[in-house]
């Protein structure tokens, strides 16, 4: 009994240096969330601050009944799911390529990482004006040249941002987030023992067998990490929406973070904005959980 008590005392002493970091984490993350949750239960418009009063969960009801918020919710889920899954698949493919030795690999790796190093607003401006612009954009110019190559005489001025606003947001987001997924998965590939792969190859395992039975299961935790981090960051990102479409046309490309911005700084409804922010937190948890479970089922089915 004395030995057990001594062991517990030693464990507490070992954990003691971690307590300041734990306390700081709670202060920086949990306390702001609790404050946001409290604000979400108040009817609080800064213009009519004297009319502020406690309303329990009525703000959540207002947000749920708002057609614009519902459209933003659907767009947020669609956009986040598409960007995370496609970026992960592209990241996996690029990581497999970079894991091989070839001349100039370091240069190629640097070039592939570059999109993630560009600030989101700069990336959005680049895609909006240089690529998607219907008058002088690269995309329309490329389509026009193909059209002329097949005998056409007209100049293509397709307004891609207006016609496909959600796709116009998803494409540059995928372009920017693919390097992030690639780096995480590449770290997993480089942590795999080459001796085990060489031994399996000597025993007659083919390339596909090595990947599906050994490499892919080994990458499970890295793929899951990239999915959960990507979901957390992408679901709350509004840079591309604000810069490229500003939520339009109509509500075709609006998302929850952008609607929170409008509710907070255009309508000045602090309570409704806080309620929508709490909803974003639960959406992030739900999407991350579903993504992890989906990934787990796929990887376990290959065993």
Image: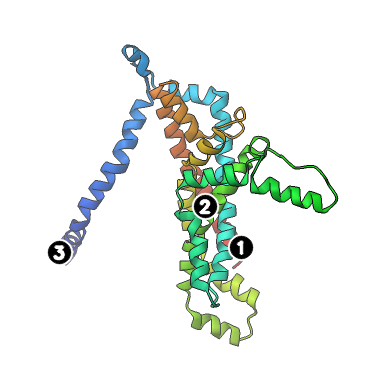
Q: Mark 2 = which residue? A: 176
Is label 1 or label 2 in front? Answer: 2
CA separation, marks 1 and 2? 30 Å
CA separation, marks 3 and 1? 46 Å
Tags 3 and 2 touching, CB below 8 Å: no
Q: Position of residue 27 (x, y in %)?
A: 26, 42
Is label 3 or label 1 in front? Answer: 1
Is label 3 or label 2 in front? Answer: 2
Q: Quadrant of the N terminus?
A: bottom left
Tags 3 and 1 touching, CB below 8 Å: no
Q: Is residue 216 visible?
A: no
Label located before the other in sequence (1 or 2) = 2
- Left or right, 134 with respect to 122, comes to right
Reply above or below: 127 against 271. Answer: below
Element type at mark 3: helix
Q: Position of residue 58 (x, y in %)?
A: 44, 20
Q: Mark 1 = which residue? A: 301
């Amino acid at each position: 009994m004395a030995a057990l008590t001594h062991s517990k005392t030693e464990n507490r002493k070992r954990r003691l240096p971690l307590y300041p970091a734990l306390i700081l984490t709670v202060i920086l993350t949990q306390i702001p969330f609790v404050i946001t949750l409290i604000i979400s239960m108040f009817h609080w418009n800064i213009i009519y601050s004297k009319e502020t009063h406690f309303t329990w969960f009525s703000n959540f009801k207002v947000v749920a009944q708002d057609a614009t918020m519902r459209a933003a919710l659907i767009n947020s889920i669609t956009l986040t799911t598409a960007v995370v899954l496609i970026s992960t698949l592209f990241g996996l493919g690029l990581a497999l390529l970079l894991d091989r030795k070839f001349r100039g690999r370091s240069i190629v790796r640097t070039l592939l990482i570059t999109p993630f190093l560009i600030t989101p607003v700069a990336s959005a401006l680049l895609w909006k004006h240089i690529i998607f612009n219907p008058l002088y954009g690269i995309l329309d110019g490329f389509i026009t040249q193909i059209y002329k190559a097949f005998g056409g005489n007209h100049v293509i001025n397709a307004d891609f941002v207006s016609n496909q606003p959600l796709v116009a947001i998803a494409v540059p987001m995928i372009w920017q987030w693919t390097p992030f997924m690639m780096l995480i998965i590449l770290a997993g590939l480089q942590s795999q023992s080459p001796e085990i792969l060489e031994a399996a190859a000597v025993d007659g395992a083919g390339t596909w067998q090595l990947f599906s039975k050994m490499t892919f299961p080994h990458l499970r935790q890295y793929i899951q990490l990239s999915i959960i981090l990507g979901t957390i960051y992408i679901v709350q990102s509004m840079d591309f929406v604000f810069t490229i479409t500003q939520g339009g046309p109509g509500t075709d490309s609006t998302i929850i973070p952008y609607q929170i911005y409008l509710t907070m700084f255009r309508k000045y409804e602090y309570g409704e904005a806080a309620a929508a922010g709490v909803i974003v937190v639960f959406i992030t948890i739900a999407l991350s959980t579903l993504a992890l479970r989906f990934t787990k089922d796929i990887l376990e089915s290959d065993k």
